[in-house]
């Protein structure tokens, strides 16, 4: 097989073979490199902002939200570890739904993944918000100004350039950044607690749960908690560039989650116990800072800590943005392999093993996301839902692969027969709990991928996908068969949107609590088993012959 081998559609219509491009990726990453990637991607702007937003939403009960987010990540991580260790591939989180559930699901999840590039825009926005301490003209308190957008665009270009070369250099630089990202939060917790501890904060000012325990659920997405803990999947998208995926991926992913959750809990406690009493006259909802820990340090006369925090405000989210740009490139590379976007972006640089064209298109997407949003919380509230849909689709994929005769994912992680459906249910609940105000934007945006799928199926479109191995998923099946296989995801998204409007999380309240969450759980169980059955039939169905 040669680099110039193309599909049956011919050289003019086709694209470079998927396997040729995959082999160009360098297998240079080991345990420490992957752990650094995972940790750096988790600990970004979240530690700078989420403690305040979570306290505003749930008060001291936000501590329970962090624990809940850790449980969700642990469940989902086991599903993702099984897939990454046994089916390693560049951009695997985009590829696995395609293989398991067909091209309709693959297109919708791929589209949501492309939209989730906005998460990198959130990190860059966080840097700008903290940089406004020194450059007041770049942030007006709600969104980036024109000068702020120009500076953010320049930073996006710089991060893209730094990702332009070999993955080994990327991993070494990221490991150095990760050390700094561990030290500064630890120093922050110790310094704040030593300088401004106020006892009774878990019970004063409305009690432990001043806004009700339901607010703990809202804080998961709306408070930025899910977004802050999210990022553990980063090593999985580099599974195609890992020396020994089966051995290194599980430890790297779980180590990143454990360290991050402990750090976030410590930061939340430090925030709760050190906010000055005079700022709590209107309860936790009245506590508001543009740069939470930096301004809190100044109030406590810790000027040296404030200077350190404002420096880390660039390094910490900058490190996550650095990793995010690399991950986004693997996602876009995988989307090109799927055929969701033009195969032009699948090309991997032969010398450095980097999908440079994918990097370039992602730079454009990041800048676009900075334009309409510009504020950290606005971006992460919507982007968190995008990531959770990827996790839900992966839970279906692992169950489908386990049921496949001779499946390569059978039994590597014990208990997957119950972990997979529970992971799907919990992911669905987290999407629902993020509230109607976010879901009314996020879910219709994902459903927009249906238009992309139909456009790809029009006569004469994407002829190169008719070849047996053009995207690794076999030749194109009839439209009706693809719609039947992937209908579960469309129904799932529509039903979640409707339940969100009916429910109590910023919805109309027509479906009261806790019956709204129980209804979502029942829906998720039914859809999960429907999706698995559809996926198994998809894998077992006879494949049509490739067109000549």
Image (cartoon, rainbow, N blue to C red):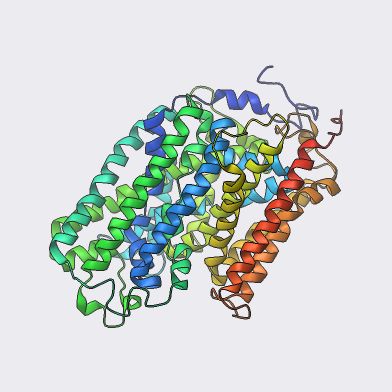
Q: Residue 72: give x, y in percent of width and height.
A: 49, 53
Q: Residue 154: give x, y in percent of width and height.
A: 40, 49
Above-or-below relation of 143 to 322: below
The quarter of the rendered structure image containing the C terminus is top right
Q: Residue 172: give x, y in percent of width and height.
A: 34, 31
Q: Nearer the viewer, residue 54 or 179?
A: 54
In-image side of 16 versus 159 (left or right):
right
Q: Residue 164: give x, y in percent of width and height.
A: 45, 33
Q: Nearer the viewer, residue 187 or 214?
A: 214
Instruction: Place residue 31 in its image quadrant.
Output: top left
Instruction: Place residue 141 in its image quadrant.
Output: bottom left
Q: Nearer the viewer, residue 415 or 445?
A: 415
The quarter of the rendered structure image containing the N terminus is top right
Q: Residue at x 67, y 51 (%)?
A: 108
Q: Residue at x 36, y 49 (%)?
A: 260
Above-or-below relation of 193 to 500: above
Residue 436 seen anywhere in this rendered image of the structure = yes
Q: Residue at x 79, y 30 (%)?
A: 467
Residue 163 seen anywhere in this rendered image of the structure = no
In-image side of 538 versus 424 (left or right):
right
In-image side of 149 versus 420 (left or right):
left
Above-or-below relation of 364 to 33: below
Above-or-below relation of 204 to 459: below
């Amino acid at each position: 097989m040669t680099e110039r081998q193309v599909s049956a559609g011919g050289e003019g219509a086709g694209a470079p073979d998927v396997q040729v491009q995959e082999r160009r990726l360098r297998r240079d990453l080991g345990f420490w490199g992957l752990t650094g990637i995972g940790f750096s991607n988790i600990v970004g702007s979240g530690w700078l902002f989420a403690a305040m937003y979570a306290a505003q939403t749930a008060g001291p009960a936000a501590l329970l939200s962090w624990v809940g987010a850790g449980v969700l990540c642990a469940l989902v991580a086991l599903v993702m570890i099984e897939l990454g260790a046994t089916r390693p591939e560049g951009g695997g989180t985009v590829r696995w739904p395609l293989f398991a559930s067909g091209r309709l699901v693959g297109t919708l999840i791929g589209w949501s993944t492309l939209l989730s590039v906005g998460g990198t825009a959130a990190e860059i926005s966080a840097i700008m918000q903290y940089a406004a301490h020194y450059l007041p003209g770049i942030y007006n308190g709600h969104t980036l100004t024109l000068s702020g957008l120009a500076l953010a665009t320049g930073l996006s270009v710089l991060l893209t350039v730094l990702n332009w070369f070999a993955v080994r250099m990327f991993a070494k630089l990221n490991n150095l950044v990760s050390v700094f990202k561990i030290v500064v939060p630890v120093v922050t917790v110790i310094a704040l607690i030593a300088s401004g501890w106020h006892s009774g904060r878990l019970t004063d000012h409305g009690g432990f749960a001043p806004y009700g325990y339901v607010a703990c659920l809202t804080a998961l997405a709306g408070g930025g908690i899910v977004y802050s803990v999210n990022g553990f999947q980063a090593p999985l998208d580099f599974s195609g560039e890992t020396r020994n995926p089966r051995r290194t991926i599980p430890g790297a992913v779980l180590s990143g989650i454990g360290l991050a959750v402990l750090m976030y809990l410590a930061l939340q406690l430090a925030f709760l116990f050190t906010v000055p009493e005079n700022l709590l006259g209107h309860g936790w909802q009245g506590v508001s800072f543009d740069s939470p820990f930096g301004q809190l340090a100044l109030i406590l006369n810790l000027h040296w800590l404030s200077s350190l925090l404002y420096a880390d405000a660039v390094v910490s989210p900058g490190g996550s943005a650095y990793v995010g740009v690399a991950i986004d490139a693997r996602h876009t590379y995988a989307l090109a392999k799927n055929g969701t976007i033009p195969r032009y972006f699948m090309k991997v640089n032969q010398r450095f093993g980097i999908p440079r064209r994918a990097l370039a298109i992602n730079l454009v997407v990041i800048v676009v996301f900075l334009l309409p949003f510009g504020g950290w919380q606005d971006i992460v509230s919507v982007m968190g839902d995008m990531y959770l849909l990827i996790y839900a689709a992966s839970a279906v994929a692992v169950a489908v692969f386990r049921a496949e005769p001779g499946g390569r994912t059978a039994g590597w992680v014990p208990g997957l027969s119950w972990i997979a459906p529970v992971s799907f249910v919990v992911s669905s609940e987290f999407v629902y709990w993020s509230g109607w105000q976010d879901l009314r934007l996020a879910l219709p945006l994902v459903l927009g991928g249906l238009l992309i799928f139909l456009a790809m199926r029009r006569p004469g479109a994407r002829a190169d996908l008719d070849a047996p191995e053009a995207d690794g998923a076999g030749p194109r099946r009839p439209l009706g068969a693809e719609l039947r296989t992937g209908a579960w995801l469309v129904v799932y998204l529509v039903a979640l949107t409707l339940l969100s409007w009916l429910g109590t999380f910023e919805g109309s309240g027509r479906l009261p609590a806790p019956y709204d969450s129980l209804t979502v759980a029942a829906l998720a169980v039914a859809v999960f088993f429907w999706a698995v059955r559809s996926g198994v039939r998809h894998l077992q169905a006879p494949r049509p012959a490739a067109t000549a």
